[in-house]
Amino acid sequence: MQRPQNPPRGTIDLLSPESLSCRYIENLAQRIFESAGFQEVKTPIFEATEIFVRAAGEASDIVNKEMYTFEDRSGRSLTLRPEGTAGVVRAYLTNGLDRKTKPVKLWYSGEMFRYERSQVGRYRQFRQIGVEIFASGGVLIEFEAITLALKLFQELKIKDLVLEINSVGDFESRKIYQEVLRSFLKEHENKICPDCQKRSESNPIRALDCKIPEDQELYKQAPKIKDYLNNESLEHHKQLIKLLEDFNINYIWNESLVRGLDYYNNTVFEIKTNNKTLANQNTICAGGRYDSLVKDFGGDNTPAFGWALGLERVMQIAEINLKQNIDFFLINELGQENIIEIISLANKLRNLKFKICFDYDNKSPNKQFELAKKLNAEKIIIFKEGKLILKDLLNEKQFVFENSEELIKNII
């Protein structure tokens, strides 16, 4: 039988030390989120297709080009989740969280799936960490959510961060602006890409999120949404900006920032990095307010805010130095007749939370010592006749013990 081929295009195997870094970031995120009263939610890796269509919008690129959709054996249309928010909103309603103490603050991590061109920092199976907050319509919850993301990146020692922020207005402001922008797109219809020509009919604002350089250059001349914000939306935006300034958090007001999903209103933001490692995929965290989505899913009128970060991108630029060292390697010089004592000591030390390895194949003592060094063992314990010799390989110190109980007593 031939060796298996590489994993499917757009997917990767995550091995140590990358897998250690992934777990480290998830654990760090959990600590930061739970310190602010967030609770973890884990949603299914696939949902009914209509969940994502309803959230992202039928005309969105996610629905039309990127979703992995299939029918199960009962003919039901299911989709591997392309983003986290829709599933969390569904879980919020179906599990009765809308009846819990408000606000409801949730966080998640897990795999997402989008069929798109693979490149640095962009995969077809990728991991996200995100937060979703329900039943709070003020700017304080937005400020807390954004600063939690910044705190996470700060602890990961990610430098050269840029916070870009904008307001896409409330639904009244957006409706007026959409008509103005639609007229602009129609006027320049022969200059924009086919996708943007379609967007001009279904959702003109989405055109501003186009990644084609020529279109982006043209859209610099487009009407700005800030000129069409009503007093309520403008005041909301000003309050958030004041909070950022009061806490000396640098930001850029990016008037072209709209995000690529239909459900956003008022605040939207992205956190980018100038780190060259990620090339053009330099957005590492993004999100915003979505006050209509819970109602669109059949719930009450519920304000909400959330964001998600791309874990693979963050891993590439975070300063994480983790080694999968072991604490003790047990070297057996007495042969197979001593294996019970080896296993017994290994179990006792593992119960004390130490990382323990030993030889399974009755190798020579020299071969066992070589294996200990390859595994980056910090200490070795040598079983000689009637003695246990503890060697500290880092400090080159040696101690002799009469039995395992004496050894354990001296190392804990």
Image (cartoon, rainbow, N blue to C red):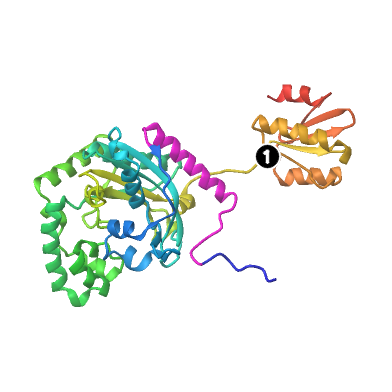
Residue drawn at 23 percent across, 65 percent down: 207
Q: Which residue lies under the disc numbered 1?
A: 326
Q: Main secondary structure of the magenta part?
A: helix
Q: Can residue 248 be seen by looking at this rendering?
A: no
Q: Is residue 132 left or right of residue 399?
A: left
Q: Is residue 389 left or right of residue 24?
A: right
Residue drawn at 58 percent across, 43 percent down: 322
Q: In the image, is residue 70 above or below residue 19?
A: below
Residue that sits furthest to the bottom in the current view: 190
- The number of discs equals 1
Residues shaded magenta: 9-38
Asked whether residue 262 is drawn in magenta, I would say no
Q: Is residue 67 left or right of residue 169?
A: right
* Picture coordinates of residue 20, whole percent (x, y): 56, 46
Q: Is residue 220 left or right of residue 37?
A: left
* Picture coordinates of residue 407, whole percent (x, y): 76, 25
Which amino acid lies under the numbered mark 1 shown in the image of this protein? Ile
* Picture coordinates of residue 104, whole percent (x, y): 31, 37
Q: Can residue 43 be seen by looking at this rendering?
A: yes
Quadrant in which the N terminus appears: bottom right
Q: Nearer the viewer, residue 361 or 287?
A: 361
Q: Nearer the viewer, residue 30 or 91?
A: 91
Q: In the image, is residue 107 above or below residue 212?
A: above
Q: Nearer the viewer, residue 231 or 253?
A: 231
